[in-house]
Image (tube, rainbow, N blue to C red):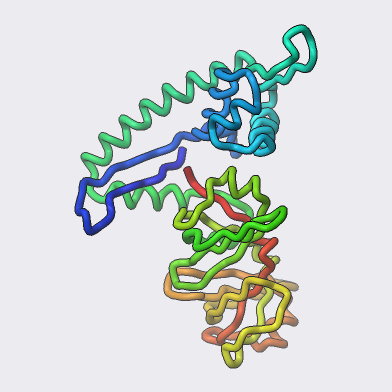
Amino acid sequence: MTDRVEGDEPEQRGPLELAGSVWFKSGEQTLGGASRIALLAAIRETGSITGAAKSVGMSYKAAWDAIDTMNNLAGEPLVVRSTGGKGGGGTTLTARALGLIDTFHAVESEHRKFLERAGAAIEGFAGDWALIGRIGMKTSARNQLFGKVASIHRGTVNDEVSLALPGGQTIVSVLTHESTETLGLKEGVAAFALVKASWVILLADDDGAPLRLSARNQLRGTVAAVTRGAVNAEVSVALDATTVVTAVITNDSVDQLALAEGQPVVAAFKASSVILGVTE
C-alpha cells in the first residue's frame, strides 16, 4: 500500500490531516488502487463502460486501458463485455471482480483507522510515512527523481509535462493524453521521474551556455564519482545537495571527456525517455 499525506497550509496552523490509499499487489505486480476499484464499482452500477468512465471522470479509452491492465494482471477476467443479443449487450463484472470490490473497501476502512491512530500517536508521522512510500519503490530504472508538476502543455496526441526538481532544475516528459489523465497529473501534483542510466548522455560543460542538442533535458551538475568496469563506467552527477543523476558510458568516453570528481558536466536525455509515475 502507498500513502499520500495532506495538511493545511503552514500559515493556517491547522491540524494535520492524513490520507492514504490502498493498492492490491500480486508479487511485484500492482493490480490496482482506489481509482481502478472505483471504475469497477461504476461498471457494476451502470452496466456500461461509457457510463462508468463518465462517472469516474475517465475517457472511454482510458477506462478500457485500465480494464485490460486489470484483466492481464489478475490472470483471469474481471470485466466481461457482451455484444448483441436481446438486451443489446453490455458490460458485466465477474464474481472475482465483485469480491475484489468488497475486499478493497474493507481493507481501505481498516487502513484509514490505522492512519488515524498512527497520526495521533507518532510525532512527525505524516512526513515520514510519505517519504517511506517513495524510498520503498522498486524499479529497474537507476534514476528515480522526485518533484512536482510545474506545467502541462497539451498537443494533438501527446502532452508535454514539466517536473520541477527540488534544486530548481526541470525535467520534461512526453506522454499520451490517456497517461496524463490516468496518473491524475495537474500543476502542483507530486510525481517521480524514472530514467535509465543507459539513456543519459554526458557532455563537458565549459561555459554554462545552452547546448544545441535534440535532447530536451539538459541537467547541469558536477561529477560526484566515476566507477569503472571492464568496458563501461558508471558516472554519478550531483545536480545539487540532494539530487544525483547516474549515467552509464564507455570507459573511452570517460577518457575523452577527462571526467573527474568536481568537473562540471551536463546530463542530457530525451523527453521520450522519461517515465512519470505517482503514488496514490
Most extreme residue toward the bottom is 207
Viewer-closest of 21 and 235: 21
Q: Quadrant of residue 114?
A: top left
Point out residue 222 in the picture as x, y percentages from the top left corner. Answer: 53, 81
Viewer-closest of 199 and 80: 80
Q: Is residue 90 above or below residue 152?
A: above
Residue at image coords 63%, 60%: 160
Q: Is residue 96 above or below residue 126?
A: above
Residue at image coords 57%, 59%: 152
Badge count: 0
Q: Is residue 264 left or right of residue 86?
A: left
Q: Quadrant of residue 215?
A: bottom right
Viewer-closest of 47 and 279: 47
| Residue 25 appears anywhere in the view | no
Point out residue 124 in the picture as x, y percentages from the top left corner. Answer: 26, 51
Point out residue 229 in the picture as x, y percentages from the top left corner. Answer: 68, 72
Q: Is residue 194 left or right of residue 118?
A: right
Q: Quadrant of residue 78?
A: top right
Point out residue 48 in the picture as x, y percentages from the top left corner. Answer: 65, 22
| Residue 280 appears anywhere in the view | yes
Q: Is residue 195 left or right of residue 214?
A: left
Residue at image coords 65%, 38%: 62
Viewer-closest of 45 and 277: 45
Residue at image coords 39%, 49%: 130
